[in-house]
Image: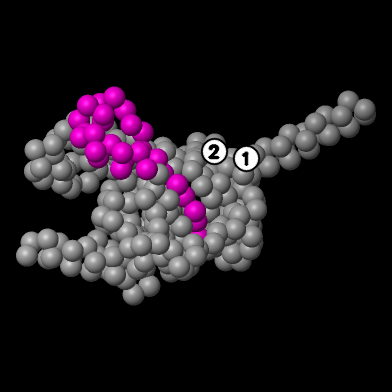
Amino acid sequence: MKRFAVAGVVLGMLTALFSGAAHADSPTQPVKALGQQFAPGRGVLVSETARVTSSSSKQTYVSHTTGSIGFGKSGVTGYDLTSRLEITPALQASTPREQLDDLRDPLRVVNVGPDTYVQGFGWGPMPAGKTWTRFGRNTATWGDYGRRGDQVVDVLSPARLKFVISKAVVHRPGEYRGTLRTQDLYAEQGPMNPDKHKVSFRLFVGENGLPIRLVTRWEEKDYEFTRDDEWVSTVYANVVDTRYHHWGAKVRITAPPASRVVVFDGLLENVLNRNVVTIR
């Protein structure tokens, strides 16, 4: 009788183990786990590496982004990210010295609600005392819709995370792999969304179901400025590797002081006026 009793206990343990493993690997668990992270004053830390290769110059640009993303009761409320371009020997050899100094400056982007504040992007001299440029809310927007850093796929929204997982054609324990279109991921933009990328992705989740790594690849046509002061058509191949860590960290995102901020439209007007004066 003892033998059957022991066998019954072992069978029960194995059943619980496999049912627990199946639950951990359920496509619905990451969405539920993400929603449980939303609380004011909490968030997640991010580290990211982006590689962009031009088909015309064969140049590869590598940037590294770190920072934090803040949550509220129902989702993301803001972020504070700083990006630095890696000055490679190839980039040094192909870039004028005066431009290299500008490329070495970090780019910091702070988003609070509808406003995005940017520091360190090259748009000519800033007005006296101003070190930040504000985008959004009755002015031009910053970056692609849904983008934080260089990552174009948003997995920090339960609805979008669910959509990404639904597009997975390869599903292994802790990994989802597939392809999606950004115009479908951000369908609420409708025809107003100008960014239509076909993106392949690999999403990795931890044992708790939370995203820990997202690798995306896509191509886009654009123009590249050459050393000969010419614009040439090119295709950029993008690879972005984003790591999410320290879930539940204390995060507080604050806007820069208003006295240090200039609205982008006002900055653009100043630049245009200065160029008109120069031409005259």
Residue closest to the eye, 78 or 182: 78
Q: Is residue 167 visible?
A: no
Q: Which disc number belongs to residue 174?
A: 2
Residue 199 in the magenta stretch? The answer is no
Q: Secondary structure at mark 1?
A: loop
Measured along the vertical axis of the image, is residue 143 above or below residue 58? below
x%, y% of residue 14? 73, 34
Q: Where does label 1 land, which residue?
A: 207
Q: Earlier in the sequence, mark 2 or mark 1?
A: 2
Point out the stretch of residues depicted in magenta.
78-105
Question: How many labels, in total?
Answer: 2
The answer to whether mark 2 and mark 1 are in CB contact below 8 A is: yes
Residue 94 in the magenta stretch? The answer is yes
Q: Secondary structure at mark 2?
A: loop
Amino acid found under the numbered disc labelled 1: Glu
Q: Quadrant of residue 173?
A: top right
Residue closest to the eye, 99 or 210: 99
Q: Is residue 247 visible?
A: yes
x%, y% of residue 157? 49, 58
Residue positioned 40% across, 40% down in the render: 84
Amino acid found under the numbered disc labelled 2: Gly
- Mark 2 Cα shell of 10 Å, populated few (<14), some (14-19), many (≥20): many
Q: Check the image and name the residue furthest to the bottom.
A: 138
x%, y% of residue 158? 51, 58
Q: Quadrant of the N terminus?
A: top right
Residue positioned 20% across, 30% down in the render: 94
Q: Check the image and name the residue furthest to the right.
A: 1
Residue closest to the eye, 32 or 224: 224
